[in-house]
Image (cartoon, helix red, strand yellow):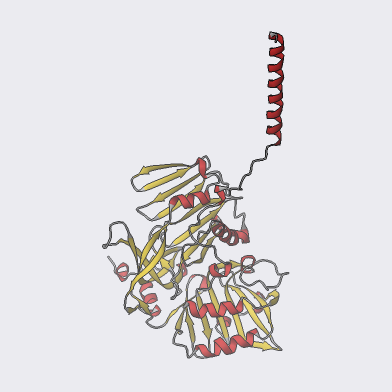
Amino acid sequence: MTYEKIKNILLIILVGCSILLTFNLWTYRPNLTPVENPGQAIEPIGDDKEYSEVIRPSQLIHFYDDKKIGTTLSAEIDQITNDMNKWELLNLANVSNDIGSLHEWIEESGHSILVYPDDVSLNAFREVMPNIDKNATDFSFDTMMIDTTSIEDDIGLAYFISRDQGTVYRGEVQGPSMADFRTKYYETASEDEDFYSLLSYKGQNDRVIYVPNEHIPVSTQRIYLMDKIKPRTLMESLFSDPSVVQESTTQPSMIEYTDSTSIMRVYEDRNMISYKNISSVVGDEFVGMNLLRRSIDFMNAHKGWTGNYRYFEEVPESNKVVFRLFHNQQGIPIFSDYHRAKIEVELGDTDINEYTRSNFALGTIVSGGEESRLLSGKEVIEEIEQLPNFERNLLQDVTVAYEMKVEKNVATTNSEIINLQPAWYYRYNNEWKKFTKDEFIPN
């Protein structure tokens, strides 16, 4: 066989192998098992919540001929709100001009009110009570009133009141719901030991503050073990691409996470986390009535609820909403230094601008103290009035609350405990302060 023939045979073999390999490459179908995108499998730091769990009244008050009584207990308020949220409320109309003295009208016998911590927009409240007049324009209110004397032909009247703005909207409740409310709640409350006598006090802009007229028993302390939030878990929920986030320890007690548009700082010594979106643009009250709704949606999107947080305050001028921890049974707010007992959400035009919160959740109750009796609301207000340069028009609210303190657990070196001590708090000139008798003693 000549050299040329051998070369031709080898060439044919190589061409054939090339054709075969090319065919296999084009027709190859690997047997792959789908794999979830790891960016979607993010461990949540807490839970999501229904709107009705976040937007809750802080007080329930009933008015009678000779007295007014109220409660903050969650069990009492939950029963009523769960029933009311099923009501069908139609034909909403502005009747502000038909009301004389707002304060006197509210306190007429047969009326019951649910007082919210701050203004609630109807737009957000539709998520709580879905069967509200679909044609009603949006407005804000801080008090909902039920008139148990207005029931006629299975139709009763309920009112949405803004005590700051002096506006009143009336709606018609359809069906036997109002009659049930009167017999089940209003007529039985006067014999219920969970209700107590109330004192009315006119504060800022003659808005009435309702405080207990007697000494209220409150547990002296409840000690919880602290459940810490994993910083990286929250970071993965807040940053659009966690893979490019840089982690650094700029101070002994601070961890910092950054990318090109955002920064998150974890302050271990303060038990606080602060997230800032530096690319966000803040408009002029751009969200209007949607501020509360968008803030709750943001919290739900990353399951950020790590306790019994409730809507507490709205600051429209800075597009900010404050959610505060409330005691599960007592239904009273919890206060602390830094941001240990509250969550602040500030919105930008299209995204979150700033987000500040604690880095823990309340854990297991270790122990509960004996009940103690705080000063009555009447005694506290009398003391507050003794403040140097006190101005009644600057006093906005007074409430029984818990003061939260974080302490090292003496049993272990790696954990902390939370103490809740009952106290009076008051809001004066837009600032919440703890009531202590010492501050009222002249220098």
User: Considering depth in this image, is 57 or 32 the residue closer to the camera?
Assistant: 32
Q: Is residue 329 left or right of residue 138?
A: left
Classify 280 as above or below 74.
above
User: How many badges with numbers are in the image?
Assistant: 0
Q: Is residue 29 left or right of residue 119?
A: right
User: Considering depth in this image, is 359 or 26 the residue closer to the camera?
Assistant: 26
Report which quarter residue 318 is drawn in.
bottom right
- Residue at screen point 61% across, 87% down: 180
- Residue at screen point 68% across, 25% down: 17
From this viewpoint, which residue is outermost toward the front? Answer: 1
Q: Residue 206, how many percent across, how many down?
A: 51, 73
Q: Residue 40, how many percent across, how many down?
A: 57, 51
Q: Residue 351, how many percent across, how many down?
A: 58, 50
Q: Residue 112, how many percent across, how many down?
A: 56, 82
- Residue at screen point 37% across, 77% down: 218
Classify 59 as above or below 349.
below
Quarter of the image containing the C terminus?
bottom left
Q: Is residue 250 left or right of residue 319?
A: left
Residue 69 appears in the figure: yes
Residue 109 appears in the figure: no
- Residue at screen point 53% across, 54% down: 346
Quarter of the image containing the N terminus?
top right
Report which quarter residue 7 is drawn in.
top right
